[in-house]
Amino acid sequence: MNIQEYIQRLALALVVIAGFLVKAAIGMSLPVTEFTLDNGMNIIVIEDHRSPVVMQAVVYKVGSADEETGKTGLAHFFEHLMFKGTTKYPKNSIDLLLDENGAERNAYTTLETTVYFTRAKADMLETLMSIESDRMQNLVLTPEVLETERKVVQEERRMRMESDPFGAAFERMNATTFKTHPYGRPIIGAPEDVANLSLDDANRFYRAHYMPSNAILLVVGDVKPADVNTLAQAYFGPVQNRVVATRAPRKAEALPTTAERLEMQDARVTDTTLFRTYNMGPNAGITPREAAANAVLASILGSNSQSRLIKQLVTRDSVATTVNTSYRGSTDEIGLFYVIATPRSTVDVSDLERRIDIMLQDVKTNGVTQLELQDAVNTAAAIDIYARDSAVSLGTEAAEVLASGRDIKFIDEVSAALVELKSADIQAAAQKVFDANRSVTLIMRPKS
Amino acid sequence: MMIRLSWACLYTLMILLFTTAASSAFEVQEVISPKGIKAWLVEAHDIPILSLTFSIPGGRNFESPGKEGAHALMTEMLIEGAGTLSSDEFKAARTRMTSRVGFYGNGDYTSGYLSTLTKNRDATASLLKQALENPRFEEASFARLRERALQDAAQSKVDQSTIAEETWFALAFPGHLYGRTRQGKQESLKSLTTADLRRVWNATANRRELRVAVVGDITPADLSALLDKTFGGLPDQPVQIDTPVTAIAKGPIEKRIAYDGPQTVIHFGNPAYGGDNRKGWSSRVLAEILGGQASFARLTQTLREKSGLTYGVSFVDSSWRFAAVQIGSFATATATAEQALQLLKQEMTTLAAEGPTAEELRKIKSYMNGSYALRFSDNDSIANEMLFVMQRGHDVSYFMTRESKVNAVTLEDVRAAAAQLLKPENQILVIVGKQ
């Protein structure tokens, strides 16, 4: 994977979290219905009758940030184990049943959530609910299954982190940005922790977090809400909450007071790359207007060919081959702003960094132009319309936002605030974000 | 199927309602413009957006020897200024309209896409028209993009997966277009000029066999006009591509390359049959049984589910214009590379000798038919699948007949395919890792 691909992957994830797209899921013309079962399970139904396909996702309100010290990687490891069979669907039969019907399924783990999703013919919804509700309560794990899957996870880690210099760079950046907060730990886990996770760890994690009151069921596609309700009552309704699910208090992260710099060298890269994060502090009190301003700031600076840094540094001055800025937004506990840039081979990275710093300072001092602001708002509005074509991804993001504990109204408020933004809002955001003392800068160089 | 004639003076229209295994129903309309440009259209007026994708045969075949990478750079340069618009003005117009216009390519086709809000449809199509008819190939943009291409080429030389993949193709297709890297090498990129790129585009630009797939908020009549307006200025001449049809190099070939990393990356492959006939479909079914995406695929079971040796293994059957291959890959820890290799070879040998079981064949057919419906999830994916089907010369009935073609494959067909395609003398294997 090269740096462009990495940026694209990162940018996609971050833009989604920024809230624009999520608003589209809620505010779009496709009908959204919400209800709650007696056991506390939230259900969201988004109707999309364009093709006879359904997507079911279960979003559990547990992620890597909920892991205990010494148990890093457990949320992700457990995600793998959820495919290994239940009392009703023994070993491999879940995969077999889904494959025979041509259904797609996968899962992923984030800092705050674990998401299991399946796409299939719409008439398979009952089967999907039967499987998902059964593995919420009747998962069967054995030592043999655990050991084989541990090897798979270790291979995944080698592939994503140890074989990929950029994966390793992000892991180190995270660990430096968050020194005490669990966000500093890799989602895939530290090698020594993954090597020691036990069957008992897995079973305890399952009992503590996998239950209806700690999950959101999302159904998107060619379905009727009343039918979904009936099926959900039948399959998820009887599932009992074993305990009251809680999220353990997390160690707070003191706001950094000194800029930090890291250097890495790797024989597997041929260009020097600059990675920088700005720790934006806790998101708890962030207003919708601030969240919108942060997202627009990232958009104006480094999201497309007309963005300020790209236009100046890549197109006009030709001192960089890539520049990207992103905002990891309001659904996480702590906000982060990323700047990533690759200088041209004839340009020293320190020169590029100096130019970037001057341009960031300029936004702090002078704000942005009305035209830049209007373009960013127009882009956000257009994304709303394009996004209606992908109800599945929108729905998943909406469920993730809910799972992170944010009120769904906040998302609408961010979107409403977007069109009211003034240049002064963006300038204020820049002044708050671009504090050198809250930054971590990593320079990755080729190793000769 | 029916033919509507009422608008015959404007365009020809054929409508076919096709039904996939999931009973999904899309109305595919074949629109032929007054200038003879052919498009498939799925009308969808519920969201005010449009996705259009198209391809022209050839492109890379026009690269002169030593000029590899010209086609890749050319496709990037088509949107770096066109007609009266500089690179900056072109991109500013595109961004302001929140539209997408771009080009890409492979060994077979030069392709492009457009997506736009309905309100900006004509203006976005006008941008595409200018890019097609009057690309500027400005020196400043060229210098910038070539610099990035040089950086990418340098990175490719040290990237483990890219080394494995490029080596496999170079061994499989020596001297052939498919054996050369599309992005070019540093030496070839350094020799390129804007004149080289212009030459490739001038040779490629042609609407005789242009194929267009469209999904979204447009009527057939409006599309017909849009086709002529956007593509009508391209030359209309016989397509001349002299790329030879080829088979992959005779095996067995096993190449080991030293690489310092925690994993070993393995690429493997053999010929496929290609073609939209029973033999071609038996080849595709075989690849799915051995290493497709279904969890019960043999390589997934052996290398991941039973032994935990890899995070994932893939094996796909690819039919191109000039060759057909089955290619797979996986990564495993250095310490387990030999064990994984032995298991890979065992699985191929066993399948070649015994063929699949009847139960495996039943399950894989069910999987292939069921999963096909999921490819039609949004406008872009529907357009891309339609273009893929058009490129292979099918008519719109393909969407109705695909399932019966899968179902027609017999156990004997797959056994014969396995015995022929998977035999050791057909195998090309590349192993990149600590030796």
Image (spheres, grey):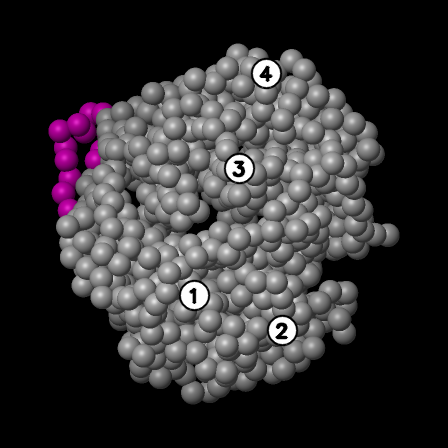
Residue under numbered circle 1:
A208
Pinpoint residue A100: horizontal percent, then vertical percent. 30, 70
Q: Residues within 10 Å of mark 1 (few under 14, many from 20)?
A: some
Q: SS of the residue at dot 2?
A: helix
State which quadrant residue B428 falls in.
bottom right
Q: Amino acid at mark 3?
A: Asn
Q: CA distance from mark 3 to mark 4?
A: 24 Å
Callout 2: chain: A
Callout 1: chain: A
Q: Residues within 10 Å of mark 2 (few under 14, many from 20)?
A: some
Does B7 lie within the magenta span? yes
The residue that appears at 30% across and 28% down in the rendered structure is B48
Q: Residues within 10 Å of mark 4 (few under 14, many from 20)?
A: many
Stretch in magenta = B1-13
Q: Is residue A310 left or right of residue A74?
A: right
Examine the rendering and report whether any part of residue A381 can be seen. no
Q: Is residue A420 left or right of residue B372?
A: right
Residue under numbered circle 3:
A283
Q: SS of the residue at dot 3?
A: loop
Badge nearest the viewer, 2 or 4 = 2
State which quadrant residue B338 falls in.
bottom right
Q: CA distance from mark 3 to mark 1?
A: 26 Å
Disc ID at residue A368: 4
Q: Earlier in the sequence, mark 3 or mark 4?
A: 3
Q: Amino acid at mark 4?
A: Val
Total numbered labels: 4
The reply to whether callout 3 and callout 1 are in contact (CB within 8 Å) is no
* Same chain, labels 2 and 4: yes
Q: Amino acid at mark 2?
A: Ala
